[in-house]
Image (tube, grey):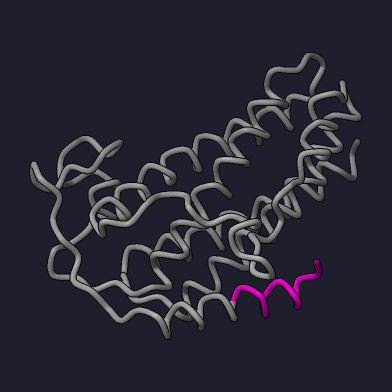
Amino acid sequence: MNTKIRNISIAAALAASLGLAGCAAVSTPAGGNTMPGMHGSSSSPMASMMPDANADHNQADIMFSQMMIPHHAQAVEMSDIILAKQDIPAEVATLATKIKAAQAPEIKTMQGWLDAWNQPAGMMSASAMPGHGMGGMVDADGINKLKSAQGTAAARLFLEQMIGHHDGAIDMANQEISAGKYPATIQLSRDIVTSQEAEIVEMKALLAKL
């Protein structure tokens, strides 16, 4: 699926969902502001993205979180696969470590939002939403190829797959920036666009050297 079609698909999904549900007030989970996977004081970076009982969210925010959780989870899985291999170029291993370190905490943050909104986490998938799948997801055959590859070939495949994966995440994040309402979710989307665009540039440079 090219970028234009992917943008249209995600936009259509968000538009349809916005027509099905209005804005709802965010409820504060039991036990105060601490969400699952988000520990620490209110001055921590995670605390700035915790749900605010006075803030409103909409269906676009819910859909973004539900779709981005499994999307991020696959990026973490791919990073784990490449990090478990021998003879991987150090720069590629460093990048995989950075991707995992960034996206694993974001998964917990989004799960916390969905818990606060009384919404199930990770329910969205390509099969659950025909025509509105998550852009850039690697299919089972692609994951198996990554598992089987070794050395430089594995590093090259990882970079190629992750570039497409990042492109999909950027598309989803841009849709949330346009259609979302919850401030922290929109800010996370902006952060995803900034960081993953930079990582795409880095990955293309690494590919050119392999």
Residue placed at 17% from the left, 42% from the top?
34
155 left or right, relative to 202: right
Q: Is residue 39 left or right of residue 124?
A: left
**Residue placed at 66% from the left, 66% from the top?**
130
Q: Quadrant of residue 80?
A: top right
Number of marks in the image? 0
Which corner quadrant of the image does residue 108 belong to? top left
Q: Identify the image quadrant of residue 55.
A: bottom left
Q: Residue furthest left?
A: 31
Residue farthest top in this picture:
86
Residue drawn at point x = 23 percent, y = 48 percent: 47
Compared with 4, 137 (above or below) is above
Q: Position of residue 129 (x, y in %)?
A: 60, 64
Magenta stretch holds residue 2: yes
- Give the camera-side residue of 64 and 48: 64
Q: Main secondary structure of the magenta part?
A: helix
Please tell me whether residue 207 is drawn above or below residue 178 in the rendered image: above
The quadrant of the rendering that contains the C terminus is top right
Give, as a single range, the part of the protein colored magenta.
1-10
Q: Quadrant of the N terminus?
A: bottom right
In the displayed structure, does residue 44 sit left or right of residue 144? left
80 inside magenta stretch? no
In this view, the residue in front, 26 or 131, is 131
Percent position (x, y) of residue 131?
69, 70
Residue at x 73% of width, y 46% of height: 162
Q: Nearer the viewer, residue 163 or 118?
A: 118
Q: Position of residue 43 (x, y in %)?
A: 18, 46
Using residue 133 as the reference point, say whether residue 26 is left or right of it.
Answer: left
Query: Against 47, is 193 above or below?
Result: below
